[in-house]
Amino acid sequence: MRHLRFVAFSLKNLALRVPQQRAVYRLGPLLSVAILLGCSAGPEPKPQSDVAGMAPPSWSTSANSGVVQSGWISEFGDMQLVQLVNQALANNPDLAVSAAHLDLAMASAKKAGAALAPNLDLGVAGDKTSYFGGQTPGSLRQNDVTSFGPSLDLSWELDVWGRIRSEHRGVEEQAQASADDLEAARHSLAAQVAKAWFAAIEAKLQKDLANEFVVNYQKTLDIVQARLTNGAVTQQDLSTAQGDLANAQQNAEANTTAYTEAVRSLEVLLGQYPGGALDVAQTLQAVPPPIPAGLPSEILERRPDVRAAEREVAAAYQFVKEAQAAKLPRIALTSSIGSSSNSLASLVDPKNIAANFAGNLLAPIFDGGARQADLDSATAQQKVAYNKYRKVALVAFQEVENALTQEASLTQRENNLTVASQKYTEAREIAETRYKQGETDLTSVLTVERQELQSRSTLLQVKSERLQERVNLHLALGGDFQ
């Protein structure tokens, strides 16, 4: 509907010292005409329906069917991990920032809603007037007159076009998006703590394995030095053994540093000083059994970050409506009741009390295109919010598909590495038996032992990756960790 523009005018003092109902009655024809000039922002967009239409009926990667379950932190069977997550929820500074952002958004929504109600102010004014005069000609003296004027002033903009309501709803949608952002931050923090916990355990175990490598290479060097004395090996063999030991020592030092840094990263997530003093578990737990992944379209409602993006679309739609309504006339009512007297005792005297009621209508004529620019900006922002929502949803689908792929791949890798580690252990045990029987030398035993240590290290790394990828899958699916 086209916007009709009127010359700005105001209706002042429609009724002086008369009941307000009469003034409102006189505004009736004005309001009737104004309502006919309304405009519509069009149907509210349904981004979830659009994005859900892109989702297939099932995941492209093989996944267990069934409903996504909550409480995934406890599924790892580690009570210390549960305690660490609770500590992080209570003390993490980033989560506290997200919570403060929600408080800010809620306050903004409350402020926007306050504009729908009338505004009542109490005013008190004092005035002192001085003049000179006398009772006889030629005599002058200063005379002071002091008056007081308390008043109650009421102002109210009639939200004919829903401009204020649209702004309020838009800010409320943003507040809901902030609430979803906070929930997403909680999920993300729980996942970060779990992954940091598993990474710290792996780092500790890798540090222990690195020290075993040092012991192994030290034994090898001792053997080479003894053989060099007997002329059984060359100086080149000695230099090689010394280099292997030095390399093993530097790897051990690097693993020690990595472990300390992993613990400090976890401590920061917990909101405590990063002193590297946190005790971690001695072993990595096994990955829990496969979990149900639900349907692709379900994550649009389950994941809080996707819900937040959808709320931003709804907020943008309301702000478009607000910008459209801002191009139409505004109607405001004002009322004031007060008195003025030079005596405090006379302030409540009915003859000193006056009431005033006024209605104002202001219709925009020329603003240099400012209001149209606001509408264009709001419309563009709505497009931005819609496409951001589509991107967030597509990334959510991608994260689940990738996590499912990694789950299958890492499971197969762990199975293969478990077999490899078992075989290297068998080979080392055979070599030790042969050495005790004098069928081989100690160097051969140490060589097989190094192969076993390396296979254990690689297996440990993949086990940690599997645990962390399981956390990623839980996070991607959007199931609550509690």
Image: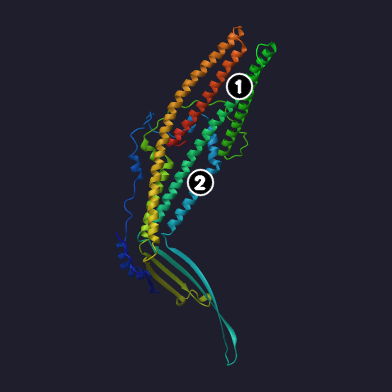
Name which of mark 2 and mark 1 comes first in the sequence: 2
Q: Mark 2 falls on what kind of element?
A: helix
In the displayed structure image, the side of residue 65 where residue 338 appears, left or right: right
Q: Position of residue 438 (x, y in %)?
A: 61, 7
Residue 219 in view of the camera: no
Categorize mark 1 by other alpha carbons within 10 Å: few (<14), some (14-19), many (20+): many
Q: Mark 1 falls on what kind of element?
A: helix
Q: Position of residue 262 (x, y in %)?
A: 57, 33
Tag 2 residue: 99
Closest to the observer, 247 or 173: 247
- Relative height, residue 61 to residue 99 (above, below): above
Q: For the N terminus, which image quadrant?
A: bottom left
- Relative height, residue 104 to residue 290 (above, below): below
Say whether marks 2 and 1 touch (CB < 8 Å): no
The amino acid type found where label 1 is placed reads Phe
Disc 2/disc 1 C-alpha distance (Å): 48 Å
What residue is drawn where x is 38% and y is 43%?
Answer: 390
Closest to the observer, 298 or 256: 256
> For the image shown, how many numbered marks are present on the structure?
2
In the displayed structure image, the side of residue 283 where residue 20 appears, left or right: left
What residue is drawn where x is 70% and y is 13%?
Answer: 229
What residue is drawn where x is 42% and y is 69%?
Answer: 335
Residue 314 is labelled as: none
Nearer to us: label 2 or label 1: 1
Categorize mark 2 by other alpha carbons within 10 Å: few (<14), some (14-19), many (20+): some
The amino acid type found where label 2 is placed reads Ala
Tag 1 residue: 213
- Relative height, residue 69 to residue 427 (above, below): below
Q: Position of residue 152 (x, y in %)?
A: 46, 68
Residue 413 in view of the camera: yes
Picture quarter containing residue 429?
top right
Q: Residue furthest right?
A: 229
